[in-house]
Image (cartoon, grey):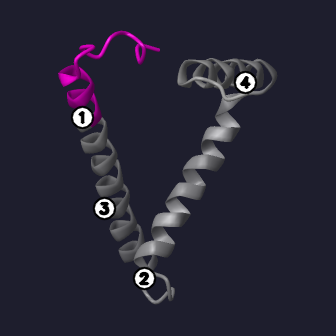
Amino acid sequence: MALTPQQRRLRAEIAAHARWSREDPTATAIRAQAGLLAKFEREVDPDGTLTPAERARRADHARRAHMKRLALRSARARARRAASPAGGGGEAAS
């Protein structure tokens, strides 16, 4: 039986709350940030030829560009929801 989008979101929220009730999010956040930074470093210097300072500078800009792309996509999605016949409703108000 397929779940509705609202049911999937609720199931995911339950799982997230259960997880964070059992562990400290700080360690997970640190690992996630390190992994994301490593991804951008590999992206800007796949051969490992740049100096560490230049790699870090470029990776920072790659990360910023990524975050701006996410923000743009989010803004477009919000605009589409606001323009929809339902007016966006409150279903994404979590």
Q: Which range is magenta? A: 77-94
Q: Is residue 63 above or below residue 10?
A: below
CA gap between label 3 and label 4 equals: 33 Å
5 horizontally vs 87: left or right: right
Q: Earlier in the sequence, mark 4 or mark 2?
A: 4
Q: Is residue 59 above or below residue 32?
A: below
Q: Are marks 4 and 2 in contact (CB under 8 Å)?
A: no
Residue where numbered disc 3 is placed = 61
Residue 82: % across, % down? 21, 21
Residue where numbered disc 4 is placed = 15
Residue 41: % across, % down? 47, 70
Labelled disc at residue 75? 1
> Three-letter amino acid code at disc 2?
Thr
Q: Which secondary structure, mark 4?
A: helix
Q: Earlier in the sequence, mark 3 or mark 2?
A: 2
Labelled disc at residue 85? none
